[in-house]
Image: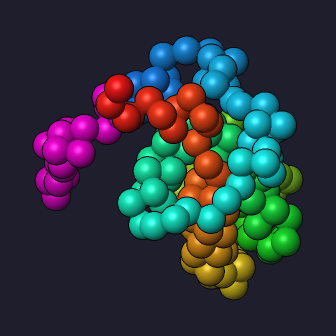
Amino acid sequence: MARIQIPLDVLTSRINFQERFQGFRSGPLSGRFANLRPLSEFFDVKRLSKPANFSECQSRINYNLSYFSTNYMVVMAMLSIYALLTNLVLLFDIILVVAGLFIIGRLEGRDLEIGTFRATTSQLYTGLLVITVPLGLFASPISTLLWLIGASGVTTLGHAAFMDKPIDEAFSGEAV
């Protein structure tokens, strides 16, 4: 039977993923966190205020999403860790899949032999699939993912909407 070849670059060329994520791959890990804003600036309660109208809310969100983007990524990572620590079955399932794939990969195509028991890599992958898929479905990863999307969205957009721009930035768009 012939394999079906899916041209991924045709599918992703319209979205332009390569250029969007070029900055993430181009430098060391410290370079990615270079624009991490200090906590005193991120949690500045003196700059918290309710936006007067929807256009001001949009303006604040556009500014703050770019200005605090790394801080928002850290918040999302912390919420992800929290979600995994509160759903221990999902965490166990993820660790089981990663460890199983690592151990099967270490065999380098050879059969696993324990005493008189012998299993091929195909049998090991099938056994891993049979164990982890039902366990993963029991762990409800979709509800955890939806919670993570909702919590990250509310936290990020809430902070971005209520955090006022700095004074020097607020007057930069006005004509003199």
Left or right: 68, with 26 as reference point = right
* 8 and 16: which is toward the camera: 16
Q: Is residue 77 above or below residue 108?
A: below
Quarter location, residue 93: bottom right
Q: Is residue 122 left or right of residue 100?
A: left
Q: Is 164 rendered above or below residue 33? A: below
Q: Residue at horizontal 71%, vertical 55%? A: 48
Give x and y (percent) for residue 55. 39, 60
30 w.r.t. 110: above or below:
above
Picture coordinates of residue 108, whole percent (x, y): 60, 34
Q: Residue at x 62, y 80 (%)?
A: 143
Total tally of numbered discs in the picture: 0
In which quadrant will I find the N terminus? bottom left
**Which residues make up the magenta segment?**
1-20
- Tell me if residue 17 is in the magenta stretch: yes
Which quadrant holds residue 107?
A: top right
Q: Position of residue 60 (x, y in %)?
A: 51, 50
Q: Residue furthest bottom?
A: 138
> Which residue is nearer to you in this view: 60 or 159?
60
